[in-house]
Image (cartoon, coloured by chain):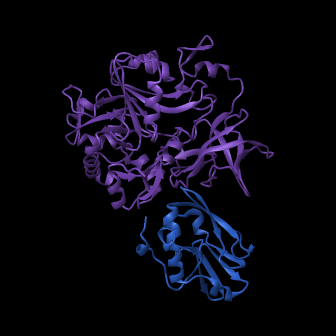
Amino acid sequence: MKELDELILPDDLGYTKEHEWAKLEGDLVVIGISDYAQDQLGDIVFVEMPEEGDSFSAGEEFGTLESVKAVSELYIPLSGEVVAVNEELEDSPELLNRDPYGNWIIKIKADELEDMDKLMDHDSYLKILEGE
Amino acid sequence: MKHTPLHDWHIEAGANMSEFASYSMPLWYPQGVKKEHDGVIESCGLFDTSHMSSVLVEGVGARQLLQRALTKDLRCCFAGGRPLVEGRCVYGVFLNEKGNLIDDAIVYQRGDDCYLVVVNAAMGGVIAQHLADFDISAALTITDMTDRLGKIDIQGPAAARILKGLIADPERVFANMPYFSFKGWFASSSASDEVRCGGIPVLLSRTGYTGEFGFEIFVTPQHLEKIWYTILEEGGERIIPCGLAARDSLRTGAMLPLSHKDIGGWPFLRNPWQFALPSIENGTYSKSFVGAEALAKVTDCDYTYAFAGYDPRKITPGVAADVVDVQGNVLGHILSCTTDMAIDRVDGGIVSIATSREDGRPADFKARGLCCGFIKVSEEIDYGETVFLNEGNRKIRVEIRSDIRPDRTARCSMETMFTDARGGKG
């Protein structure tokens, strides 16, 4: 298992306490899971994703990750409508282990882009991890 | 938490550690559980299983005691009605008077009056006490060997080819060594059957908990680290260290029960492991044993079945999870549920990465893995029938199965494994 100082936590992402990340890309928000999440889960063997057009409120479950160890829910960092799902993950869920930031899970059209400001920055997220 | 002698190695290797039966054990190493699981099927894996307990039963009356306490009939437990003899070992279970499981075990016959009973982690004291509670003679010694015996499992088609380079006189050792037999002893002896691995005396047993060809190696704790390093070095690219997660997914796909999960404090009946009981002749068991009378009287008890799903999705057993039929009626609950990462569905059937092309493995086969495990339900269900694992808003369709992962190698002959192409020639 990775030590905290071995985790990759990019500075330009917003994080949640459930270990998702979100990043602004044009007028869309790209969502994935953090290095900590993939390291804790171990090999991810299946990603259950929503359909394009599904809408969720911030904090709502939008899918699940199956690792050998457990089934984990995915929680959406901010409210919005799904406009793209990463279909590559259907055949190759292990991409999330290999590069959790290069491989996103969904893209959404956020209801309020300002909600990005409510997410944790790198330092606040690291503090949460120090407590786990 | 307790540690095995390899604890520092696990930490150094970057293992994800977790508590299991009060021991700190590796769940997986940085290469990940899928590589470990597939590695055992395709080449070879090495497991630290020193958390497991054992009990030594020595002296006049040892066999009679075990014949009474263990379910298996030691007089006729091998093919053709042959008895347990020196150098062979047998799987059975210990039941209480109610016919409920205390633990499962493999019993090794070392000599006429000497048996090693290998049980689950934390169960050495329980089984030692259970055996001592029988009316036994003063000449009989029962020793709880918990933490006094190290064990590592080398599992996979390349296991014998790797060990061949480390074992003294390998031709002698590997000759006449069928499934469920063993040679040597973990303490040094002058016996002609001594087995030395890397110079260290070992008990080498052709058994395991993965469904694949391989060995369990018993050694005194002070020699454990040296054996572990020596085997890893000899195996090189052909061997991968494996944690408990791969052990669990491999054993589930191989239809092997986990004690106190798939079998437990309920009557040992109507499950896939009835071979652990004596044969029934004229309506009665071929021998009397503790629990037999209770089992004979049971008229109604649950059924335990293996299942496999259609993709890797699973549901973790728990109070909120149950098993339902097509109409949604609750049938029972989940005992074990994991993903066997080496298998997938092809035309409805199950194919493994070990399945040959002739037997139906497509050229472009990529196993996504299948959810599989065991359920305990209140009614009889036919193989091939569909049930659902259910938890909250998740519902997973699974098939009741008589077997899960095909083309396993555990029972392959030693000769086959020396010529088998998998895992490289060695």
The one of B83 and B225 positioned closer to us in this rendering: B225
Total marks shown come to 0
What percent of the width, then of the height, locates residue B392?
73, 56
What percent of the width, then of the height, locates residue B43?
38, 48
The one of B253 and B323 positioned closer to us in this rendering: B323
Can you name the residue that lies furthest to the top here?
B282
Q: Name the residue located 54 percent from the left edge and 81 percent from the top edge.
A: A124
What percent of the width, then of the height, locates residue B47?
38, 47
Q: Is residue B426 visible?
A: no
Name the side, left or right, on which A109 lies relative to B106: right
Q: Is residue A16 visible?
A: yes
Can you name the residue that lies furthest to the right here?
B327
For the colour blue, the matching chain is A
Quarter of image, res B118:
top left
Quarter of the image where the N terminus of chain A is located: bottom left
| Position above or below: B320 against A30 | above
Q: Name the residue located 20 percent from the left edge and 36 percent from the top edge.
A: B168
What percent of the width, then of the height, locates residue B265?
60, 34
Name the side, left or right, on which B327 lies relative to A10: right
Q: Name the residue located 58 percent from the left edge and 23 percent from the top edge.
A: B97
Name the side, left or right, on which A117 lies relative to B138: right
Colour chain B is painted in: purple
| Position above or below: A130 against B304 | below
